Amino acid sequence: MKPLNRALLTTLAALAAAPLAAQTDTQVAMITTPQDTTPAAEAPALPAVAQAQVVIGSPAAGRIGEFEPAKQSGEFDGMQLQIGGAFAQTFQALDHETDAAGVEMGKIRPGFNLASANFNLGAQLARGIRVDLESYMASRHHNEFWVKGGFATIDASPFDVPVLNRIMEYTTIRAGHMEINYGDAHFRRSDNGNTIRNPFIENYILDAFTTEIGAEVLVRGPYGAFVMGGVTSGENKGDIKDGAVDASPAWLGKIGFDRQVSPLLRLRLTGSLYTAESSPAVTLYGGDRTGSRYWGVMEDTTSLKAGTFFTNGRVNPGFSNEIRAMQINPYIELGNLEVFGVIERAEGKAATAAETREVTQLAGDVVYRLFNDKVYVGGRWNRVTGDFANQTDLTVTRRALSAGWFLTRNLLTKAELVQQEYDGFAATDIRNGGKFNGIAIEGVIAF
């Protein structure tokens, strides 16, 4: 058999095994070589990559209540390729209204939104060294296949030097184009097709999420304590053009602890910082290019028809040049009860603004799990106050009730009843006295 034909059959065998592997939690399939009657002396040697393991399932999928991934520095049994994906389909029945003068609200009706999907590839290259490529197959704002980011994670020293081995027992390094680890809220958000980590339908009003080019160093200490420091380009894509706005790096850090105090009690508390003195395009609160889960709300007829907006229900304060942000996140698990909080304050400005502005976000999630974690019910309160572009003393408040059912570990159906209100906006702003409310239902597959 020719090497090309053999490699093709090998690949097809692996793909055929993948759906079977996906039905289990371990989800591991070994690529095997088809039986060949060619005498051994005449058979060409197989490429080394054909002996790699293929694992169905990606750590990027995550679970509710998961934060920084655990260290992966065990024995290396050969290259391992991980294939993962996520798919989400949402139905919404939302109504909206406004007190703004002369504004005709866009007409929205109950219906299904366009589905979204993610695709992830990961490879374990050596002991404690892996690389991940995360992509969006389809999203609300981009209907084409495009890459979210690619990065390397190092959990073990590539050199067998005692002092480096000792340091890497406690240290994790990430480098590349990646989702930055600012705050804990980004671990609980819907990321396009991957919404299985979010017990609700939509993210927080002030959505702190972006992908940037840089590196982070996480050091774990005793009793669940840890500290992280990092530096990035301060932009969500590479750019070498020298413009009117200076480009300086962005710095971020996190400190906290996460400890299982007893079989019934887990405590976590973190504080995070992100700062950039000058950047052509800070996107900490506008880095999600996939879109929100609430389609069409708080849009007039013209913008709804044109498809102008894709972050309905969120607020972007417009700190695109200078920013200093802080987020504190308490998290408690007591038996089946989970409580998560967001205390966030940020100040900054656009390049054309003379003075900085401030915004504050408060949020609280309460989730209770039932029937061996297969069912949950939850409530969320979220409020953002502050000065947005050209307007001051504004308030946006959201209340949501949710329920979810894990049919399997990888399959979730959830529903949310939501109400959001806007206060303090200008008389001609569509958000003046604005509100939307209704129900959204979502089905999620993530592995």
Image (cartoon, helix red, strand yellow):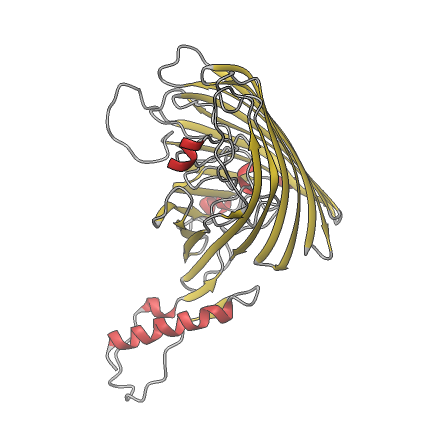
Q: Is residue 99 visible?
A: yes
Q: Is residue 155 left or right of residue 11?
A: right
Q: Position of residue 356 (x, y in %)?
A: 46, 14
Q: Position of residue 283 (x, y in %)?
A: 41, 30
| Residue in the picture at 30% in, 73% down | 8
| Residue in the picture at 40% in, 37% down | 305
The image quadrant where one finds the N terminus is bottom left
Which of the 4 image quarters holds residue 306?
top left
- Residue at the limit of the structure toward the top, as seen here: 354
Which of the 4 image quarters holds residue 237?
top left
Q: Nearer the viewer, residue 182 or 415?
A: 415
Q: Nearer the viewer, residue 133 or 53?
A: 133
Q: Position of residue 257 (x, y in %)?
A: 63, 37
Q: Position of residue 267 (x, y in %)?
A: 69, 39
Which of the 4 image quarters holds residue 279?
top left
Q: Nearer the viewer, residue 81 or 9?
A: 9
| Residue in the picture at 45% in, 22% down | 323
Q: Is residue 213 visible?
A: no
Compared with 12, 230 (above or below) is above
Q: Is residue 257 left or right of residue 237?
A: right
